[in-house]
Image (spheres, rainbow, N blue to C red):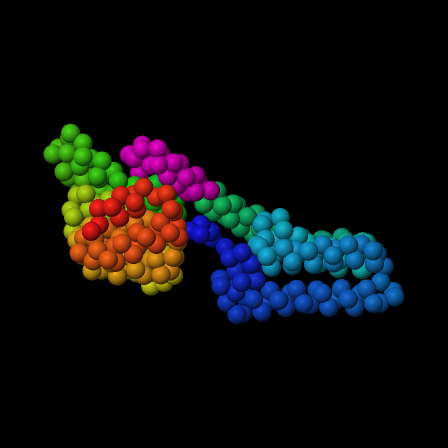
Amino acid sequence: WDFLYNKAHNEFLNILANQGLMGILTYLGLISSFLVWSIKKLSDKKTENKKLLIALLSGYITILITNFFGFSVVMVAIFFFLFPAFSFLLTKPDIKNQVAVNLNKQGQNQEKNLFFKDALIAITVITSLLLLNTIIKKWRADFHYARGKNYSEAGYLVAGIQDLQKALELSGSEPVFHSQMAETAARTAVAYQQSREASQAAEIIKELEQTSIKETNQALNLNPFNLSLYKSQAKVYIYLSYLDPGYTKEAITALEQAIKLAPTDAKTFYNLALLYKEINNLSKAQETLEKTVELKPNYLKAWLDLAGVYKQAGQNQQAKNALNFILEKLDPGNKQAQKMLEETK
């Protein structure tokens, strides 16, 4: 239920969400024009290669069906354009002769246009090299990002920062690069703070702290509507709260912004409630947990925390109701709920 994916499981909805009305109308226009063209060609007695055209049209229709219930991968997306292209070529029996005629005309005019062609080739080569360099640069940036993230997750934080810094130098417009750098820098600052050399590393800790804040803000400046980036920012401030408990409020603000983007995401509400508990704001924690279980009635962890908050607030009957709900509806053998119920008078 909480699986985060980067596409809607419907190609048409995905295009509508990302490219808007103009995008979906263009996409549907492309599809409908090819379908109408195919029907006309199949109805025309002069059309050759009808069997092959039927085969390509059938394949094209299967792409539309699978895209409706899922989304296109790279090869399917290529076929989406290749099948119509193949169909157009198959319905032109004189295509070989036409190509030969065109080549012959080009040969006759070659001397006249030699300078123009050489210039065009030079421009094409230079442009291709520039584009190729851009692609290589993007690849290198992605390589360093992936390696930096892997280093970070494995606990090699300094090495991770070095690779992430290279990724940002190569491609500073990627929000996810800034977001990962922010998380890694915050974790590194905490690691230094908890080490024996904390007193000697005060300047480094401060620098990492400032870097993490700057990078998480930069990520959101580049993409202020990305739910994952707000969750990442909350994580950054939670790490930094080990340095200064005041950062917990910043984490709360980040999750509140995330909720504005995704007002039905139960997990975000749950994490926000935990932060409210952290700063002993039980009324807000209770309110948020109640909203959490309203959004997801079988959220076991949220019910347990809600029962705990009720108990802390002296609302024992509500706590019993929550615990009985767990034992009757969700997990009859839950030992934590049974123990809490026995302790609640």
Judge by depth and name the residue closer to the eye, 139 or 249: 249
Residue 85 picture quarter: bottom right
**Dominant secondary-structure state across the stretch colored magenta:** helix
Residue 338 picture quarter: top left
Q: Is 157 in the magenta?
A: yes
Judge by depth and name the residue closer to the eye, 70 or 138: 70
Q: Is residue 18 left or right of residue 305?
A: right
Judge by depth and name the residue closer to the eye, 141 or 21: 21
Any part of residue 85 in sight: no
Residue 101 picture quarter: bottom right
Any part of residue 149 in sight: yes
Q: Is residue 258 left or right of residue 78?
A: left
Residue 339 point in image, percent of width and height: 26, 43
Residue 288 point in image, percent of width and height: 28, 59
Q: Residue furthest top?
A: 196
Residue 301 point in image, percent of width and height: 33, 49
Judge by depth and name the residue closer to the eye, 117 or 171: 171
Residue at the spot 83% in from the left edge and 67% down from the top edge: 43
Residue at the spot 15% in from the left edge and 29% down from the top edge: 196
Q: Which residues are magenta?
A: 139-161
Q: Is 211 in the magenta?
A: no
Residue at the spot 37% in from the left edge and 60% down from the top edge: 295
Residue 148 point in image, percent of width and height: 36, 37
Q: Residue furthest left?
A: 199
Q: Is residue 92 left or right of residue 281?
A: right
Q: In the rendered image of this protein, does residue 253 appear above or below residue 206?
A: below
